[in-house]
Structures are given as C-alpha cells and as structure tokens.
Image (cartoon, grey):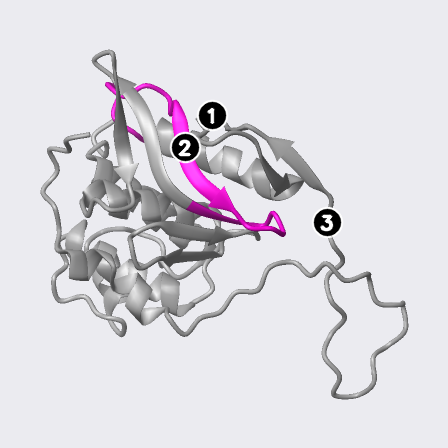
Amino acid sequence: MTNPITSPSRRRILLGAAVASAVTVTGASAAHAAPPTAPPAGAAPPARPAQPLVARDRIATARLAGGPARFQADFHERLDAWLAFWSANSPRSWSTPAEVEGTVSAAGDEFTLHAIRISRDDETRDAFAAGRVDAAHLATLASLHHHFPSVRVQAGGALRVTDGPAGWTGSAEQVAFAVTACRELWGLRAADATNWRKRVSQAGHGADPASRSGWAAFTRASLRRGLRTESY
C-alpha cells in the first residue's frame, strides 16, 4: 500500500530495537504448578502453570494469514481489542482489517506482527508492513504499546508483543518508543530519554505520559498522529 505520509528514517523508527535489545521476556512455563508451600529462602518463585490454548483463525475482523493458530484465551482477547482499537482510529477510507499476518509463540502468549491488510478502492493493501518504515509503522507500534506491557521491534521491523495488562512500566522499550514518537510524530526534535515527558507536557498533552492514564492517552494520540486521523 502506498502511504502518503512522509517516511521517517529507518534508524529512528527502529530505535526501539537497538535500545531494548537487552530486554528479555520469557513466555509462560509448561511446568506444573508448584505446591502451595513457601519456597526456601532465596529460591526462585514457582513457575507459572501452563495455560490451555485455543485455536483461532481470526483476530477481531481479520483472518489470520496461514490459517488457524493456537493462543492463550486471554491473550487472544487482548489482540482482538487491540485490532479493533487500531481500526477505530484509522482513516475512514480504510475498511476494517481484512487480514493479519503474524506468528504466535508455542506457549500462545506472544505474537509477532508482520502485516495488517485492509481494503481500499476495491483493492487489498498493506496498511502496516513490517519492512516498510513510515509513520503508519510507528502508529501501529503506538497502538500495541496502548494494549500490551512489552512490545519489541525486531530487526526486520516486525513487532513482537507479550501478553499482560497494559500500562506504563518505564522499560527501555517504552522509553525508546516514546522518544521516537516525540521526534517523528509530535515534532519535538529535542526530546530524549531524560526530557521527553516534560516536552510532551509542554506541548499541551495534559496528563503525565508516564502515568497509567497519561500513557494510554499518549499512545492513542500517537496512533492518530501517525495515521493522520487526529482531526476526527
């Protein structure tokens, strides 16, 4: 899909991958639940029990490219809510998402997004594509940060999310995204990891973007700025 939005540099858009490369997120364990006795002092906490997986061939309105995949049920519900949110804030000329391309982890609690396809002018187009560095890429990253606690930019631009409640955590991934969004979507070129919150507040954003409500508002506003839908 040809996107009329001016494309930021690959170095800036993929900043999150470089900054957050040291962050490791582990999927759910397949081990049995630990007995209800306190572990010895200094011992690691008991492993999370395996969760039953459900087969799904769609995320919200969009069919999954490649056919059904197996997800943890609550994670799939979160993905449904995310894609509906992305669609509700997309241009009116775009259809609801028709297809999502991505892969789910064996534990069913991580998803790597490669493409979102919509219909426009009777043609199916990529509204988001992992390898295409543009404002829609950063907007989609914002939408995922709105719904998930961990979002990592992969080397080729794919976006990997991990299940869990959304909100500000202060992780390297979130800070890297926030700085890039400030520079590329908000026009705050002097923003960096130490001053981005202050600069967003000075720009009239309102709530502290590092609070729970402020992070939700900041990521939603960044999504709309990236897709140029902030006027409606």
Q: Quarter of the image holding residue 118?
A: top left
Inspect the image, locate mark 2, and give the three-letter code of the amino acid beneath it: Val
Picture coordinates of residue 180 (x, y %)?
23, 59
Inspect the image, locate mark 1, and give the three-letter code of the amino acid beneath it: Arg
Please provide the residue range marked out in magenta: 89-112
How many callouts does the rendering have? 3
Q: Which residue is mark 2?
A: 100
Disc 2 from disc 1: Cα separation: 6 Å
Residue at the extreme top: 122
Q: Which residue is mark 3?
A: 51
Label number found at residue 31: none
Element on which disc 1 rests: strand
Image point 59% across, 43% down: which residue? 75
Inspect the image, locate mark 3, and give the three-letter code of the amino acid beneath it: Gln
Q: Is residue 139 above or below residue 83?
A: below
Q: Which residue is mark 1?
A: 63
Q: Quarter of the image holding residue 192?
A: bottom left
Residue at the extreme front: 66
Picture coordinates of residue 34 (x, y %)?
84, 67
Picture coordinates of residue 186 (x, y %)?
18, 51
Element on which disc 2 rests: strand
Q: Is residue 153 left or right of residue 93?
A: right
Disc 1 from disc 3: Cα separation: 24 Å
Q: Residues within 10 Å of mark 3 (few under 14, many from 20)?
A: some
Element on which disc 3 rests: loop
Disc 2 from disc 3: Cα separation: 24 Å
Image point 47% across, 32% down: which residue? 66
Q: Residues within 10 Å of mark 1 (few under 14, many from 20)?
A: some
Image point 55% across, 50% down: which residue? 105
Q: Is residue 63 above or below residue 48?
A: above
